[in-house]
Image (tube, rainbow, N blue to C red):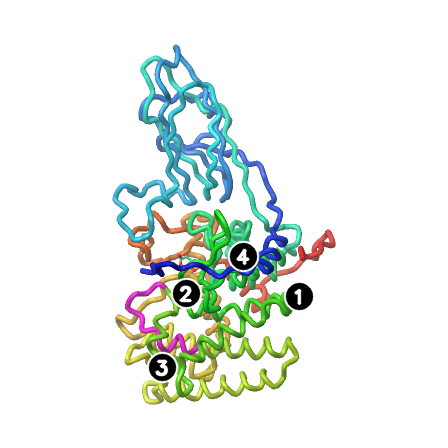
Amino acid sequence: MLVSIIPGFVPQNDPELLEKAKASRPKLNKMQLAPLRYLSGDTWEAAEGLKEKELGLGDQVTLDFGRHAVGHVSLDFGIRGSHQDAPLWVRLEMAERLEELEERWDTYRGWISPSWLQREEYHLDSLPCTLSPERRFAFRYVRITVLGVSRKFRVTVNKAEAIAQSAADWDRVPERRFFEKDLQRIYDASLMTLSECTQDVMEDGPKRDRRLWLGDLKLQAETSYISFQSLSVIRRCLYLFAGSRFPDGRLSANVFTDPEIAGDDTYLMDYALFFLDVLCDYVEHAGDREALNDLHETALFQMEYVLERCQNGLISPESAGDFFIDWSDDLDKWAAAQGIVILALNAAERLCGLLGDTERAGDCRKKAEEFRRAARAEFYDPEKGLCLSRGQVSLHTQVFLTLSGVMTPEEGILAIRKAEEVPGSPGMMTPYMHHYYLLALLMAGEKDAALHHMRLYWGSMLEGGADTFFEAWDPEDPTSSPYGGSQVNSYCHAWSCTPARILVEYYPEQYLEMPVEKTQEADT
Ligand code: RAM
């Protein structure tokens, strides 16, 4: 569970930085969509016939728009029979996957608000009319259920449409043709996931939380550089984080933009440290010196804050509790947290390099060395050939201590393989964690194994007909949820968009790349 409430918390806003965030607001591209087919009973029918279908009490149709969409729905209801002597009472349910509609919504008792459920009811007093809910939804399917209608009339759906929106520009994406069909599908679904989450900010998921989270932003930005190059959105997000911080200078784990910009009173130490990486990557891709000048102090402060919570080259075990790492209640996070601190020191070195501060860069390098040595002494068990975090073996520990160089790549892969055999060790719960697992395999040169895992894990999400990748996924237990009920799971989630980037960077032999036809400038 992650619920942080700091009484009296007021984020410290920096108007100048927030002005720059506002100036980088992206344009949303809109697209009109119509349903391709509809489900009535057990049969899919062509959408053209929908307007002829008369609906009475308890009747239900499910529209399929044929692709995932983020946006608004509009339905024209008509009337057949005698006068409308009573309101039409209708329920709309929006779903990213068909399976969501099979879930019992009334049984949801999880710790995340049920108000996220995309389920609305309306009373329509005067037919015919157009119902255009103001709320934005994330959906491919829209189920319409007639909850109340009189005996004198029946209802028709004369027209259905959706306006889908995204700030991602597909014209900037080079066409990549994969030789193998399943990799093409994984690549396409990754980019679809990213495109759907690229809105006014880089959202974590357009169904839920529809919000800018730092750990998600890192992976979105990395994937965006090989595809949509949404530089202005990334710039906006960096300025939003820096522009609304904890009063002591720490970065919030996420930022609200409605009704006004406000950093949340939730702090995740790993997320705050990732700001260093996101900033370096952005400056390297965009060449944006202004952002570097404006934001580097904020970035380096995140590192200093964490270093104050370290002793003898180790993050304190108490502070490790402020790391996210993964949705896994029984995970001992200490060792993985140490790995992330080392990775952040590497990023701090890179940032100082961009600033031309070679002395400080050298200090960061030395510190990273010291932290690696200390970590090896504390966590690595040469006899067992793996790392332990206060006695616990987990993949999370092996992955982050491989990526941070505490173990050599050769030791790392052996440790990962051993950890996989340990019964009862905490499992990886999210595509976010699986992403870092893939990177660790690749670091150890295990290209085949990494591709196999990508196919197995991300590929299995597509098997049931998904268009986008999910927030949480366990192929062995498809309805599992970190929230106490899969009804609130998001099925188009930013942190799972990374296979496209991994395929492009590590597997160029798997595809042919066509040059982008229009010469497009990235949106700075
Ligand atoms: C969830 C969101 C988000 C993630 C945080 C930690 O609420 O899904 O993606 O970054 O948790």
Tell me the amino acid under the disc marked 2: Tyr
Q: Residues within 10 Å of mark 3 (few under 14, many from 20)?
A: many
Foreground label between 1 and 3? 1
Q: Earlier in the sequence, mark 1 or mark 3?
A: 1
Q: Which structural element holds mark 2?
A: loop
Foreground label between 4 and 2? 2
Q: Quadrant of the C terminus?
A: bottom right
Does residue 336 belong to the magenta stretch?
A: yes
Q: Residue under label 4, please give it.
A: 187
Residue drawn at point x = 39 percent, y = 37 percent = 93
Q: Quadrant of the N terminus?
A: bottom left
Horizontal side of residue 520 vs 111, given as left or right: right
Horizontal side of residue 1 vs 361, given as left or right: left
| Mark 3 Cβ and ligand 1 under 8 Å apart | no
Q: Earlier in the sequence, mark 4 or mark 1?
A: 4
Q: Are marks 4 and 3 in contact (CB under 8 Å)?
A: no
Where residue 394 sits, quadrant-wise, is bottom left
Residue 454 pos. (x, y %) = 46, 63
Taking the image in four quarters, ligand 1 sits in the one at bottom left
Q: Which structural element holds mark 1?
A: helix
Q: Earlier in the sequence, mark 2 or mark 3?
A: 2
Residue 290: image tag: 1
Q: Which residues are magenta?
A: 327-339
Q: Indicate whether 346 appears above or below 210.
A: below
Q: How far apart are the alpha carbons under marks 2 and 1? A: 26 Å
Residue 311 pos. (x, y %) = 39, 85
